[in-house]
Image (tube, grey):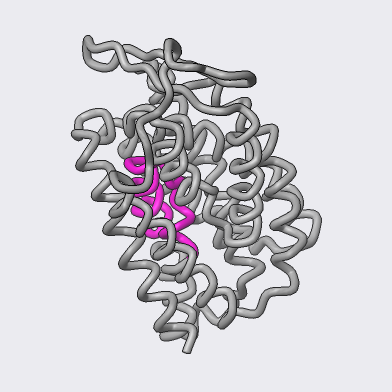
């Protein structure tokens, strides 16, 4: 029964995560922590092994959804690669910090982090200015990208240095909490860099694939992975990643943002309550 539950968790977390570019860890980790609290069959769950398992599962979620998004030309490969310069070292830093975190503190900090990030969406129109376009003082080390979305040209611009710095912080949160970084990187790309949601989510999944490979390798070396349960979740994650990527392209950008908000609010409140 535990193996069936792991398959379902992998499927649902990857499906929701791929739609919003979260990677699935933001669902996978809290759900396992929830089961550990109320079901003795999940007594093996700790912050260390659940994060390690989440990152391995996200390798397959990220690969499945990224391949689907690439076929539809929705991945900003250049920006994603640039952000990886910061996120990969950050992920390794997070993995190191993770071994010192206890489960109650882990849930509390993770929950607070979710609510802080989601609050950015509700104040973005007041606090975040429109992205600088190429003909408006682009400045040094600035990246400008243009994509065709459903027959309409969309342009956004951002600072490469700021992007790498934020990606380092996001990578650190990914390695620490096992969330793939999408729960932070997608809001950052949409709010700070002007990415359309239909480009931000696919680009996030592209990054999640590579950063998860690095982070999970460190966890494997540390012996944090319970392979039997991890392997049970991987087939569900592959299927869910593909289905989520397909559904993503059928939804309006505002719908994607609202899915991201609702999921993060529910998880954030639940984790904070569980921590007490």
| Magenta segment boundaries in residue numbering | 8-29
- At 56% from the left and 41% from the top, the residue drawn is 59
Q: Is residue 117 visible?
A: yes
Q: Is residue 65 left or right of residue 245?
A: right
The residue at the far bottom in this view is: 276
Q: Residue 50: image x %, image y %?
A: 58, 65
- At 48% from the left and 55% from the top, the residue drawn is 25
Q: Residue 262: image x %, image y %?
A: 27, 58
- Based on the picture, tell me whether residue 110 belongs to the magenta stretch: no
State how many labels appear. 0
The residue at the far front in this view is: 137
- At 51% from the left and 27% from the top, the residue drawn is 158
197 or 223: which is nearer to us? 197
Q: Is residue 127 left or right of residue 256?
A: right
Q: Residue 28: image x %, image y %?
A: 45, 60
- Based on the picture, tell me whether residue 21 belongs to the magenta stretch: yes
In this rendering, the answer to whether 110 lies above or below 11 is: below
In this rendering, the answer to whether 56 lies above or below 273 is: above
50 or 6: which is nearer to us? 50
């Amino acid at each position: 029964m535990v193996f069936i539950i792991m398959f379902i968790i992998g499927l649902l977390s990857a499906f929701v995560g791929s739609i919003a570019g979260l990677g699935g860890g933001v669902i996978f980790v809290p759900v396992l922590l929830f089961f550990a609290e109320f079901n003795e069959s999940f007594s093996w769950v700790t912050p260390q092994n659940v994060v390690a398992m989440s990152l391995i599962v996200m390798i397959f979620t990220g690969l499945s959804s990224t391949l689907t998004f690439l076929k539809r030309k929705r991945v900003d490969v250049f920006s994603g690669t640039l952000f990886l310069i910061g996120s990969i070292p950050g992920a390794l830093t997070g993995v190191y910090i993770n071994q010192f975190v206890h489960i109650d503190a882990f849930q509390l900090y993770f929950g607070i982090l979710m609510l802080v990030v989601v609050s950015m969406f509700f104040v973005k129109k007041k606090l975040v200015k429109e992205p600088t376009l190429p003909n408006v003082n682009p400045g040094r080390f600035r990246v400008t990208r243009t994509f065709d979305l459903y027959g309409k040209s969309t342009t956004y611009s951002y600072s490469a240095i700021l992007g790498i710095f934020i990606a380092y912080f996001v990578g650190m949160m990914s390695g620490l909490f096992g969330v793939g970084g999408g729960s932070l990187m997608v809001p950052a790309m949409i709010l700070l860099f002007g990415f359309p949601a239909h480009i931000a989510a696919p680009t996030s999944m592209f990054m999640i694939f590579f950063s998860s490979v690095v982070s999970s390798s460190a966890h494997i070396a540390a012996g944090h992975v319970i392979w039997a349960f991890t392997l049970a979740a991987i087939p569900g994650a592959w299927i869910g990643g593909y289905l989520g990527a397909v559904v993503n392209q059928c939804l309006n950008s505002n719908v994607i943002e609202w899915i991201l908000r609702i999921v993060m609010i529910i998880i954030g409140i639940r984790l904070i309550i569980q921590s007490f």
